[in-house]
Amino acid sequence: MQILKPIVAALAITAIAGPAFADAKIYPYHSKDNYCPYGLQPITISGVISCGTPNQSQSYKQVMQHPTPKKRLHVYKARRSSNCAEGEKGCF
């Protein structure tokens, strides 16, 4: 019975605030357990997990992942120093 209280509360929130979230992005929440009533699935609205029908294909976690920047390869070229006198040691 303790599981039903949060579900009923979540359904009440979605019923009351449903029109307010009409334009909101509703993301699916991927989890092993689904305690939502038949036909509904866990969703995330502004970080709050409740039951409903998502209107986005990706999860919120997938959307917020930033792409990794490409590694830049720095190539250092050896340069000859041409300011040495002819015959001096250490010059090429």
Image: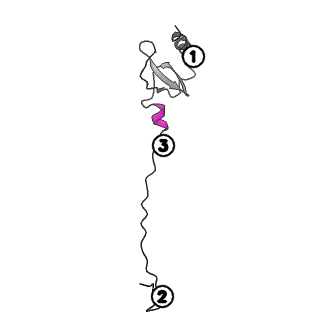
Instruction: Measure the C-alpha gap from mark 2 to mark 3.
Output: 51 Å
Sequence-first tag of 2 and 3: 3
Question: Is 47 above or below relative to 67?
Answer: above
Sequence-first tag of 1 and 3: 1
Residue at screen point 43% across, 18% down: 34
Q: In the drawing, does residue 18 fall left or right of residue 74? A: right
Please provide the residue range marked out in magenta: 57-86
Sequence-first tag of 1 and 2: 1
Q: Nearer the viewer, mark 1 or mark 2?
A: 2
Q: Give the dominant element type of the magenta stretch: helix, strand or loop.
A: loop
Name the mark on residue 66: 3
Badge 3 crowding class, 10 Å Cα cut-off, few under 14, some 14 to 19, many 20 or more, is: few
Name the residue carrying label 1.
13
Name the mark on residue 84: 2
- Disc 1, SS: helix
Question: Is 49 above or below relative to 81?
Answer: above
Query: What's the amino acid at mark 3?
Result: His
Q: Quadrant of residue 62?
A: top left
- Disc 3, SS: loop
Badge 2 crowding class, 10 Å Cα cut-off, few under 14, some 14 to 19, many 20 or more, is: few
| Residue 30: x %, y % from top left | 43, 26
| Residue 28: x %, y % from top left | 45, 26
